[in-house]
Image (cartoon, rainbow, N blue to C red):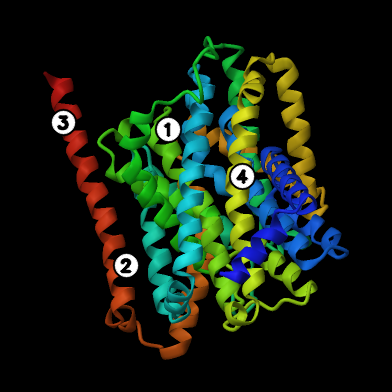
Amino acid sequence: MDVLLASITDVFTPFVVLLMVLGVFIGLIFGTVPGLTSTMAMALFVPFTFQLEPIQGISFLVCLHLGGVSGGLVASTLLGIPGTPSSIATTFDAYPMAKNGEPVRALGIGIVASLVGGLLSFIALTTISPLISRFAVQMGPFEFFALIFFALSLLAVLAQGSMLKGITAGFIGLAIGMVGFAPIDGLQRYTFGVLELKGGISLLPLIMGLFAIAQLLAEIKAGDERKEMNFSVKGIGIKVAEIFQNKWNMLRSSFIGIAFGILPGLGSGTSNLVAYAQTKQASKNRDKFGKGAPEGIYASESANTAAVGGSLIPMLTLGIPGDTVTAILLGGFMIHGIQPGPLFFAENREIVNVVFIAFFVAIFLVLLFQVFAMRFFTRVLMIPKEYLFPIILVLCFVGAFATNSSAFDIGVMLFFGVIGYILLKAKFPIAPLILGFILGPLLETYLRRALMSTGNVADFFTKPFSAIFILIGIGCVLFTFINETRSTKKDSKSASM
């Protein structure tokens, strides 16, 4: 108790509070501007903490991390561009809701879901860290393969009305993910002698092309058709009853976020898509998803924020970063002479408490910033397209270039912008493509590691955890296929009557 009180006293000094406010604010800016991410923010600002005391530097970095993930909500809702990879699924329903005249409500739902996801991940971080990490570290390549296979089985669920189109888009994503050096043996694939392709296609130029450029092309073709915006709503635009109606949705999605955050290589970029797909599968109103369904926003935002706390669990208890951002954060810890790992909780109890307190404070700082700024942000939708689109285009060019400081990535973004526009016109869903791109290389890596370890395919079904998730994945595909077949028969019957 004395150590906890000492940690609280150290964190709530004026200078550390100022650093936490700055961390959240800078993170929100990086998350909001398309092309800038919390990874970039962390990489840029870790060196600035060199001259700070460990408590000061770590408090700043934890707040920067959470702010960066939370900031993606604004761009996803108002521009239809994922501000960060963790907000891809938010775009599917938040942007249509905003375009339908309810930008305040869309942001309000995202803010509440982020708060719930953050608080639940804080509880997981502070109470069950050692237990969860002990389980995660026991997972081998067979178990990881099965988990990723299950996530990929949701390609069928993410298809909006056409399972075949969803699976096709997923395979396109898998093919794009194979560009560059192969995992394990380093064989070059689909590089066509182009030096820049050896490292593979970068995620940010890909999603900015598929979402931002494709959406700009679609909006230009559609013309300047505006629906009347409802800015007169009170508070954050949602009722308490609606929040309680989505309590199980947020609880399930937060659990998915925490679980995927804990598992190395997955994190919030995957968890928001998986949570969205699970919510869509469980919903009675699947046809409303992609058109402004509030359940989709609740799922995505609670999952991506929950994944932040989840990704900190293996980093603190095992010294294994859950994603790229926590890998940089781990470097920040080590710069200050702190080594996370199995002995971290016993030897650095004060620093552990500082991480917990800073994370908790960051949750509410994000809430305050978003609530007070949301009505200002919603006015973006009132800017005429002839002024707004050039600004978005410039931000896209800057963001794509900033990924690797390469003009090649701008070309990648424009190429996938055209591909994305064609897919939109053909009514192919983008989400399965993104999920296939992110998870494809991981699936291949764990498949090859598993086969190298035993050489026996049967082991995928003899290991309980692996067998369960493979069977659940197959069940998801079959369930979706049966549902789609039934709905097609109903539609054909009603059309013939």
Among the 4 quarters of the image, the one containing residue 497: top left
Q: Sequence-wise, which precedes: disc 4 or disc 2?
A: 4
User: Which percent across, then down, holds residue 416?
Assistant: 63, 42
Q: Amino acid at mark 4?
A: Ile
Q: Which mark is residue 290?
A: 1
Among the 4 quarters of the image, the one containing residue 377: top right
Relative placement, left or right, of 161 versus 129 is left
Is disc 1 surrounded by few (<14), some (14 to 19) or many (20+) residues within 10 Å? many
Q: Amino acid at mark 1?
A: Gly
Provide the residue designation for mark 2.
Answer: 469
User: Which percent across, then down, holds residue 480?
Assistant: 26, 48
Q: Sequence-wise, which precedes: disc 2 or disc 1?
A: 1
Q: Given the current orientation, which residue lies at the most extreme right position? A: 51
Query: How far is mark 4 from mark 3, CA to CA?
Result: 36 Å
Mark 3 lies on a secondary structure that is helix
User: Closest to the observer: 340 or 156?
Assistant: 340
Provide the residue designation for mark 3.
Answer: 490
Is disc 2 surrounded by few (<14), some (14 to 19) or many (20+) residues within 10 Å? many
User: Which percent across, then down, holds residue 429?
Assistant: 45, 40
Mark 4 lies on a secondary structure that is helix
Query: How far is mark 1 from mark 3, CA to CA?
Result: 22 Å
